[in-house]
């Protein structure tokens, strides 16, 4: 089925309906489930919070996520996965779930409500099943960023009580997935980009100040905000205090707001001093850059053509396009490197020949560069089988430059197009590592296109997960100290010379040697 047929109705849906239908987290049965949990149950509280009752659910056999879309005129592209609390026994699904999603939407943040498995499964650590669900949720959301038009590098978690413990676990256990990958979505990072922990419990051992053993705080733990009250009768304030100290000792950007009164389990309904926590959280998110969207949300009638596969029809590209597809078909099986890109990639075979012979002639490489290519053209060739049957160790991707010259495509569109290309490479070639090259500077001096490239590259850098995707923002190597580009590097301020190709090769060669020497995993 063509990607176009999938994307068009999906784009219409997510841009016109704020709350999607719940989506199962797992393609089949969740890990470790035995089918003995019984049907899901809903419980109405017998006491009031903020003058109202609230709903809890338990006996949850099928965990889900549900997207709550921010209004189009406010949408920042940021997303928060909301984790309700309930002691790993129940989920306070409205008080700490849907009501919070509505608040996030009001400040321009897309919300994803996570219904993780409760109660804790017998014979397993109290958090084990929920952690699997939390990690899976982050990866699954990140795998849908193109379709949902959200930024894959601004996906955070907001948890309450046990949900805060779960958010902390996801923030500290992302380097090793707690379950065996089940599909292509698990190729995406499960590390949240930031976390907000509301009246978090179980962050320290019960009788002392030692951080709980399941939480390993390192310098790679994402920025974290903690909210706590001194009179919390359930989650001791020390839980947040000493976790905050652990974050600071590790050099993690952290902030904590401690209030005298508020108790526990208040959500957005408190009338005590802690009631200002939503304002403080919004300020923190803004200061972190989460709410400073470099790419304004597109209007609801805007269609991103950068992610809709289409063939090139220019005379100069037709023969090359056919050659590339034929080249792919005639060279199935293992190879070292495939190059995917536009004219600068194609011209490794002409202007870059000397450098190519020095670095790549001794390796089995396939050049899939096509003059004039945009992301949508690459996606079209993927549909035509360009990657079918190939087993490259590394794919070097440099695409998107030509998209920035299309006034109908925003920087958000171009970013989504590049992300779609990388996602397709990782999905179709799961054993292949991706070297992602930043968009090159174009023009003799700084201009609008350069500014847009800087914005896109800043977002692309956050795709680098250190394992499967490696980003190189090499544009600075092409620019002199005075901000100009020499014709000795880009003869027309767009296309590389021999010296430019030398810089490209030198930039990626150390990583190429490392990846090509490593066994396929």
Image (cartoon, rainbow, N blue to C red):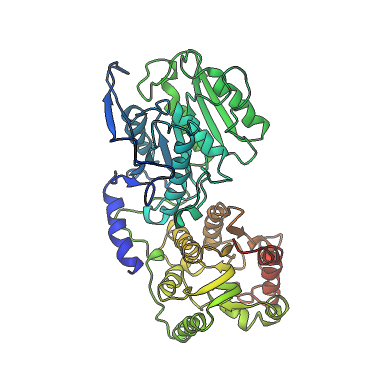
Residue 277 occupies quadrant: top left
Q: Position of residue 495 (x, y in %)?
A: 60, 75
* Residue 450 appears in the picture as rendered: yes
Residue 345 occupies quadrant: bottom right
Q: Is residue 214 left or right of residue 20?
A: right
* Residue 292 appears in the picture as rendered: no
Total numbered labels placed on residues in the image: 0
Q: Is residue 300 left or right of residue 252?
A: left
Residue at coordinates 31% horizontally, 18% vertically from top-left?
Answer: 50
Q: Nearer the viewer, residue 42 or 283?
A: 42
Residue at coordinates 41% horizontally, 65% vertically from top-left?
Answer: 306
Residue at coordinates 37% horizontally, 47% vertically from top-left?
Answer: 29
Q: Is residue 372 left or right of residue 491?
A: left
Q: Is residue 299 left or right of residue 382?
A: left
Which image quadrant: the N terminus? Answer: bottom left
Which image quadrant: the C terminus? Answer: bottom right
283 w.r.t. 147: above or below: above
Q: Nearer the viewer, residue 70 or 367?
A: 367
Q: Position of residue 38 (x, y in %)?
A: 30, 35
20 w.r.t. 392: above or below: above
């Amino acid at each position: 089925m063509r990607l176009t047929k999938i994307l068009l109705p999906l784009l219409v849906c997510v841009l016109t309906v704020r709350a999607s239908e719940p989506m199962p987290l797992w393609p089949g049965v969740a890990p470790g489930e035995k089918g003995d949990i019984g049907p899901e149950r809903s419980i109405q509280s017998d006491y009031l919070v903020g003058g109202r009752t609230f709903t809890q659910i338990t006996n949850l056999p099928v965990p889900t996520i549900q997207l709550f879309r921010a209004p189009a005129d406010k949408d920042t592209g940021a997303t928060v996965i909301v984790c309700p609390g309930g002691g790993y026994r129940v989920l306070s699904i409205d008080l700490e779930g849907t009501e919070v999603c509505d608040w996030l939407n009001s400040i321009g943040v897309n919300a994803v409500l996570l219904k993780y498995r409760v109660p804790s499964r017998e014979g397993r650590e109290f958090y084990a099943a929920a952690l699997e669900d939390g990690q899976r949720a982050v990866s699954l959301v990140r795998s849908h960023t193109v379709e949902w038009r959200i930024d894959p590098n601004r996906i955070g978690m907001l948890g309450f009580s046990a949900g805060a413990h779960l958010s902390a676990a996801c923030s500290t256990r992302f380097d090793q997935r707690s379950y065996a990958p089940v599909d292509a979505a698990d190729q995406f990072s499960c590390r949240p980009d930031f976390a907000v922990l509301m009246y978090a419990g179980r962050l320290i051992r019960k009788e002392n100040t030692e951080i709980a053993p399941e939480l390993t705080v390192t310098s790679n733990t994402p920025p974290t905000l903690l909210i706590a009250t001194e009179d919390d009768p359930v989650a001791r304030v020390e839980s947040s205090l000493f976790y905050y100290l652990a974050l600071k000792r590790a050099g993690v950007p952290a902030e904590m707001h401690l209030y005298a009164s508020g108790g526990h389990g208040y959500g957005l309904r408190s009338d005590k001093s802690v009631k200002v926590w939503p304002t403080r959280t919004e300020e923190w998110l803004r200061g972190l850059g989460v709410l400073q969207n470099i790419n304004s949300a597109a209007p609801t009638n805007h269609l991103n053509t950068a992610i809709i596969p289409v063939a090139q029809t220019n005379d100069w590209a037709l023969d090359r396009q056919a050659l590339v597809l034929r080249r792919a078909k005639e060279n199935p099986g293992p190879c070292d490197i495939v190059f995917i890109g536009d004219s600068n990639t194609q011209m490794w075979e002409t202007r870059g020949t000397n450098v190519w012979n020095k670095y790549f002639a001794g390796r089995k490489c396939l050049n899939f560069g096509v003059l004039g290519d945009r992301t949508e053209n690459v996606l079209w060739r993927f549909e035509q089988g360009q990657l079918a049957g190939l087993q490259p160790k590394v794919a070097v991707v440099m695409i998107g430059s030509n998209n920035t010259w299309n006034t109908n495509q925003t920087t958000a569109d171009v970013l989504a197009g590049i992300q779609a290309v990388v996602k397709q490479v990782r999905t179709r070639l799961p054993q292949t590592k991706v070297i992602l090259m930043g968009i090159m500077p174009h023009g003799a001096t700084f201009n609008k296109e350069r500014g847009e490239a800087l914005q896109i590259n800043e977002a692309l850098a956050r795709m680098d997960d250190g394992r499967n995707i490696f980003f190189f923002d090499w544009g600075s190597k092409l620019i002199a100290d005075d901000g100009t580009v020499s014709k000795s590097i880009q003869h027309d301020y767009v296309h590389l010379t021999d010296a430019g190709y030398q810089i490209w090769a030198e930039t990626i060669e150390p990583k190429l040697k490392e990846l090509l020497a490593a066994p396929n995993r």
